[in-house]
Image (cartoon, helix red, strand yellow):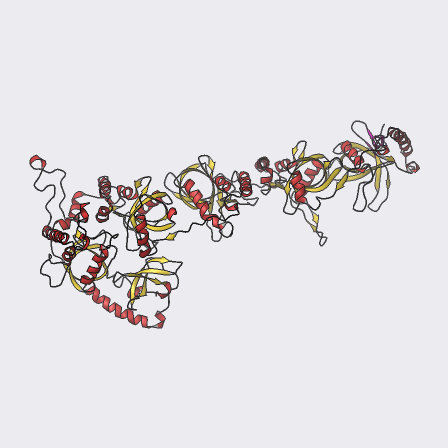
């Protein structure tokens, strides 16, 4: 049949009931509501009334029949109402079907009472036709005319009192649904068909995206809140495709506000993906773990919009690539999310692992796992080759420098992912505009959720076992106690925690819970600069850098042999079964210290390494010459070949040595080191005279109350301060050797006398450098050692006897010292001590020590000692007499026969 004129065209946007449609004009900008003439369908429920029988069935029939389709329609009449005129008319579908005829024929609506009374043109004909159609529907028992039909479906308006229970029941399931309303581009109201007779109408948040908001009315004050840019377009995009369309909703979870989160799929696919492709929404991270692999599809859709500069990304500028993947070596693990890496050229830089964070130091539950997480990463990465890709840079903020965010992989495994899987890192929740996120961000989120559910690492309800290290180098007494235990063990496993200098390290021994300062024995490494105002010795920094590169945070093995005078542990360190001391010497970055090398038993190895470095002119030996060295040591150069009968010369390979020359100095011994037997001496003369004057000035200075104020802050190692010696209550110049920040104490060395003690920070005073500093008068305590002698090992009680004897015969009394050799490399004077009335060099205190059996003649004599043949012979004779008489260390026989 033909429609009355005029005929209009529109697209059906939605249906309000079984007899009312919402039509969208061809322009897409305006809508009009049209009720079908002469019929009445059952009403849907409202806030105050329940749904009438067959209401939903009637609406569903009309929805499926017309929504989204283009139709032609004619308005027959209009009825005035409060909201304006309500239009009534007829509609023709593309296949020629006419409404309301088709609806009445299926029994989905009844002829309206009094419809025949309307006088408008065409109404009488329409009513007459519908009466016949309705009669047939009645006779066939269709729709509302059916008797004993199916039970009307109930529809719940929300998730009830247990939303979590609902989610647990339906999570992951795809539920057939209809979109009843589109609130915004990412939020829709759907009617979910849980069962045939059980429906629920809820708001669903589209998982994985956020669309711009639309204009809304604030319920508290009635004010209109403006929408965000592209909010209306995003809403219209979803309305056009989903409003009153059949969809499937995959239930995923609940938002923090209790809104159902799900994936809404049209027969053509996930609506969120289409929104993103048009630039009408952005990806959000907090649903990533719910979506799993599907999140990758959404991010790809978002990238497409960015590349095409659509919608929200119209002004988007793609971040420039910071470079291709590079290779590097992990040189240091700063924390569980920060590494120092070294590239092929040797340049080192700091990088942060993208999108992850170490256990938060401010979180009482996470912070105990910080050391464990760092150690986990150290074991996996230190010294290992890794591949690095810089994801972006995080700008510097107050208190933080600019940081490079990187994806680091080792053997094809992403390091950040490994950390998160083990529960030793959490995933950063990025802002939507962050560009430095990891390329596997969604995998990280999924791994974090798994680690949390399995209680791994910092997600464990049990706190970690804390490993507390005891610092045995804190004092000499503690060091000696621990040295006794460690010296009995060989190749003790340890970790280098810090490289203090080329030959000095802080090491941790996990199995002993021990922390100690470890000093490489047998070598002397040049000193590196200790601060910006300090000057390094030649090759000091190179030596320090080499040790850092090879040893920092590495697993090593140590042999402990002795203690130094400040609580350090002297011995041999092995890395990959190689001696670190030998490696330094081979590179020309350290020299052999003959005395300690002989004592350690590694002399041959070290001397061979030094000879190799000299021949190769490496490091400090770059200008080495054999002739120059021989001259410095007081001996002629030994030729490579020796002439003489049968290849043996009369010198037996030794060149002639210069005669020993007296070089007498008036001195006072001010301190004797109990661990080595070495001396601190003052050279009497103008220096000590000036010291006496300075001390008088010093005493006057400290009488003034204004000069008795404590230090302004914590002292630093190397600072020169004023300290009151506990034994006599007098103020002296002192240098800070080490600090205990927990106890707020410092070990100080009295620089004019050589002795040391521990003082609280509060007892120290500032020292005016211009009046009392080292520039005014250099420290008067000079290092010295007794020539020709080798003292008993510190592990025996005989060394204490030797020191006690020296204190009786030498301490704090005027003596004469013959300076046999000035070792400028170690800043050490080798001396023979004499009473002022001694007749010759043979009548020395050195000889008395040997006669008492408290020292032996050194096994390996230095060139200047070999030159004094008469003295050596005399001392050896005294040693034999002491052995025969069982004096001192010889009381149980000759210890050297083994």
Q: Is residue 285 magenta?
A: no
Residue 627's image quarter?
A: top left
Where does residue 548 sit, x and y in percent of width and height? 35, 45
In the depicted structure, whether residue 524 falls above or below residue 123: below
Up the image or down, 376 lies above or below 667; here it is: above
Q: Is residue 2 left or right of residue 238?
A: right
Q: Does the stretch in magenta take in 106? A: yes
Q: What is the quadrant of residue 162 in the picture?
A: top right
Pick the residue in front: 488 or 172: 488
Spot occupied by residue 470 in the image (x, y as percentages of width and height): 38, 53
Residue in the image at 79% along x and 27% along y: 95
Give the farthest residue toward the front. Answer: 892
Q: Which image quarter holds the C terminus? A: top left
Q: Which residue corresponds to the image point at 85% horizontal and 45% vertical from the top-left?
A: 81
Q: Is residue 37 left or right of residue 670?
A: right
Q: Position of residue 418 (x, y in %)?
A: 48, 39
Magenta residue span: 90-107
Q: Is residue 757 above or below residue 75?
A: below
Residue nearest the viewer, comparing 408 with 799: 799
At 80% from the left edge and 47% from the top edge, which residue is drawn? 48
Closer-to-camera residue (658/224): 658
Place of residue 290 in the rendered image (x, y in percent of width and height, measured from the top left): 60, 39
**Image position of 240 (left or right of 545):** right
- Which residue is nearer to you in this view: 315 or 133? 133
């Amino acid at each position: 049949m033909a429609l009355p004129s005029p005929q209009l065209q529109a697209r059906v946007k939605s249906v309000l009931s079984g007899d009312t449609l919402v039509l969208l004009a061809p322009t897409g900008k305006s809508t009009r509501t049209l009720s079908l003439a002469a019929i009445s369908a059952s009403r849907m429920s409202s806030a105050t009334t329940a749904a009438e029988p067959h209401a939903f069935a009637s609406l569903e029939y009309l929805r499926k029949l017309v929504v989204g389709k283009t139709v032609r329609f004619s308005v027959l009449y209009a009825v005035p109402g409060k909201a304006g005129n309500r239009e009534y008319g007829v509609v023709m579908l593309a296949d020629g079907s006419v409404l309301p005829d088709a609806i009445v024929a299926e029994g989905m609506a009844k002829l309206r009472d009094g419809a025949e009374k309307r006088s408008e043109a065409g109404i009488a004909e329409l009513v007459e036709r519908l009466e016949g159609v309705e009669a047939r529907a009645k006779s066939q028992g269709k729709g509302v005319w059916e008797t004993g039909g199916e039970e009307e479906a109930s529809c719940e308006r929300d998730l009830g009192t247990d939303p979590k229970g609902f989610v647990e029941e339906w999570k992951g399931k795809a539920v057939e649904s209809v979109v009843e309303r589109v609130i915004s581009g990412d939020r829709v109201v759907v009617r979910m068909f849980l069962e045939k007779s059980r429906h629920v109408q809820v708001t669903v948040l589209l998982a994985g995206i956020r669309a711009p908001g639309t204009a809304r009315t604030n319920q508290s004050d009635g004010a209109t809140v403006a929408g965000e840019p592209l909010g209306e377009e995003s809403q219209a995009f979803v309305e056009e495709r989903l409003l009153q369309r059949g969809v499937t909703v995959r239930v995923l979870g609940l938002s923090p506000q209790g809104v159902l989160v799900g994936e809404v799929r049209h027969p053509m696919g996930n609506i969120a993906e289409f929104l993103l492709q048009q630039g009408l929404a952005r990806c959000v991270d907090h649903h990533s773990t719910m979506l799993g692999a599907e999140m990758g599809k959404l991010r790809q859709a978002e990238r497409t919009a960015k590349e095409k500069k659509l919608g929200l990304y119209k002004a988007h500028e793609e971040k420039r690539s910071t470079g291709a993947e590079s290779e590097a070596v992990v040189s240091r693990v700063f924390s569980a999310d920060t590494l120092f890496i070294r590239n092929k050229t040797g340049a080192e830089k700091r990088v942060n692992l993208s999108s992850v964070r170490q256990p938060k130091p401010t979180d009482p539950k996470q912070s105990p796992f910080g050391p464990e997480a760092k150690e986990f990463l150290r074991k996996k990465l230190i010294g290992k080759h890794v591949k690095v890709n810089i994801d972006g840079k995080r700008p510097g903020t107050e208190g933080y420098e600019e940081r490079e965010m990187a994806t680091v992989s080792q053997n094809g495994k992403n390091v950040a992912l490994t950390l998160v899987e083990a529960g030793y890192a959490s995933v950063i929740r990025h802002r939507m505009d962050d560009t430095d996120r990891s390329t596997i961000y969604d995998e990280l989120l999924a791994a974090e959720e798994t680690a949390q559910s399995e209680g791994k690492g910092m997600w464990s309800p049990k706190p970690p076992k804390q490993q507390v290290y005891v610092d045995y180098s804190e004092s000499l007494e503690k060091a000696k106690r621990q040295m006794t235990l460690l010296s009995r063990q060989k190749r003790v496993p340890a970790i280098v925690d810090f490289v203090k200098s080329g030959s000095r390290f802080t090491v941790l021994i996990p199995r002993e819970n021990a922390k100690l300062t470890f000093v490489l024995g047998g070598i002397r490494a040049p000193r590196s600069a200790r601060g910006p105002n300090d000057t390094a010795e030649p090759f000091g920094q190179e030596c320090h850098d080499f040790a850092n590169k090879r040893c920092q945070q590495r697993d090593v093995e140590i042999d402990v042999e002795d203690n130094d005078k400040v609580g350090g542990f002297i011995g041999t360190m092995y890395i990959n079964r190689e001696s670190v001391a030998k490696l330094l010497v081979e590179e020309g970055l350290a020299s052999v210290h003959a005395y300690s090398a002989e004592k350690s038993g590694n002399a041959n190895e070290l001397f061979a390494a030094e000879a190799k470095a000299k021949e190769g002119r490496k490091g400090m030996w770059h200008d080495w010459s054999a002739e120059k060295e021989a001259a410095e040591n007081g001996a002629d150069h030994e030729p490579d070949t020796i002439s003489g009968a049968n290849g043996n010369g009369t010198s037996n390979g030794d060149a002639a040595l210069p005669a020993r020359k007296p070089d007498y100095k008036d001195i006072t011994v001010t301190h004797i080191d109990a661990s080595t037997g070495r001396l601190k001496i003052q050279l009497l003369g103008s220096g000590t005279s000036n010291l006496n004057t300075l001390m008088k000035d010093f005493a006057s200075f400290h009488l003034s109350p204004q000069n008795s104020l404590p230090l302004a802050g914590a002292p630093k190692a190397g600072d020169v301060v004023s300290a009151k010696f506990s034994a006599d209550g007098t103020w002296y110049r002192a240098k800070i050797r080490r600090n205990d920040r927990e106890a707020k104490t410092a070990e100080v060395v009295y620089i004019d006398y050589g002795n040391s003690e521990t003082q609280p920070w509060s007892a120290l005073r500032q020292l005016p450098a211009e009046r009392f500093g080292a520039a005014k008068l250099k420290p008067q305590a000079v290092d010295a050692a007794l020539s020709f002698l080798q003292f008993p090992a510190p592990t025996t009680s005989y060394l204490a006897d030797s020191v006690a004897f020296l204190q009786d015969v030498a301490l704090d009394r005027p003596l004469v010292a013959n300076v046999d050799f000035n070792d400028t490399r170690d800043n050490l004077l080798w001396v023979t001590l004499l009473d002022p009335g001694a007749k010759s060099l043979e009548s020395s205190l050195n000889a008395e020590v040997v006669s008492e059996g408290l020292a032996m003649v050194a096994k390996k004599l230095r060139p200047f000692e070999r030159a004094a043949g008469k003295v050596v012979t005399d001392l050896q004779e005294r040693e034999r007499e002491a052995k025969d008489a069982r004096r001192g260390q010889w009381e149980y026989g000759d210890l050297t026969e083994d």
